[in-house]
Amino acid sequence: MALRALGQALEAHDSEMKGHTDRVTELARWMAEALAWSPSQRQALRWGAYLHDVGKIEIPDTVLYKPGPLDASEWAVMRSHVEGGVQFAAALGFVPETTLRVIADHHERWDGQGYPAGKAGCQISLAGRVLALCDVYDALISDRPYKKAWTPQEALAEIGAQAGRQFLY
């Protein structure tokens, strides 16, 4: 529960992100059950869901909550949350490697155009790929400073359209 509290701490002063951690965690739990993952795999994914955005603690609010598109330098700052999150989680000393990979891989893309490492295909951990689906779905169906919420049907259609690019096809 302490890891969940860390994830929720990011949401404390941002009403637009409120509930993101719990929604992504619930989606990840459902996916892990559907994939018949072991209890240890489920726990690692759940912990990754709790911590996937913890590196955003270091991102200035002017970038994190900018109402319009980010410029190139702002994107570089935003992308740094992944490596910051991995460093933070690793420093806890008890977070399993699978959880660290979830955090590290949740913005990688099947086509290699993601970040921070530009991994492609099966270089991306399966747990990271599952978390990415959950994270993107929740981001699409949620209001954000830069966009209105999509319907669940629109979000699923977009995920399908990204097969072979952002996600496994």
Image (cartoon, rainbow, N blue to C red):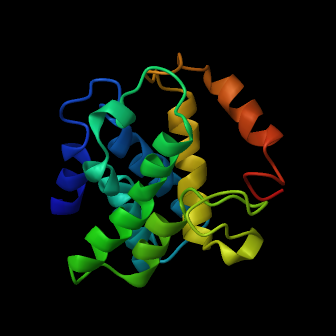
Residue 151 position by quadrant: top right
- Left or right, 45 with respect to 1, comes to right
68 or 158, nearer to the observer:
68
Instruction: State how many labels appear.
Output: 0
- Residue 36 visible in this rendered orientation of the protein: no
Q: Residue at x 48, y 53 (%)?
A: 79
Residue visible at 70% across and 34% down in the picture: 156
- What is the quadrant of residue 92 in the picture? bottom left
Q: Nearer the viewer, residue 145 or 80?
A: 80
Tell me which residue sits at (25%, 50%) in the image. Answer: 57
Outermost residue, top side? 148
Q: Nearer the viewer, residue 156 or 115?
A: 115
Quadrant location, the C terminus: bottom right
> Left or right: where does residue 43 sit relative to residue 141?
left
Q: Give the vertical position of 15 relative to 118 (above or below).
A: above
The image shows residue 80 at horizontal and vertical percentages of 43, 57
Is 99 positioned to the left or the right of 154 in the image? left
Residue 132 appears in the picture as rendered: yes
Q: How far from the left and from the top, in percent, is residue 110? A: 75, 61
| 120 in relation to 79, above or below | below
Placement of 78 over or under 90, stated as above or below: above
Residue 150: % across, % down: 60, 20
- 36 to the left or right of 11: right
Where does residue 1 sit, x and y in percent of width and height?
18, 59
Q: Residue furthest front?
A: 73
Q: Residue at x 73, y 75 (%)?
A: 122
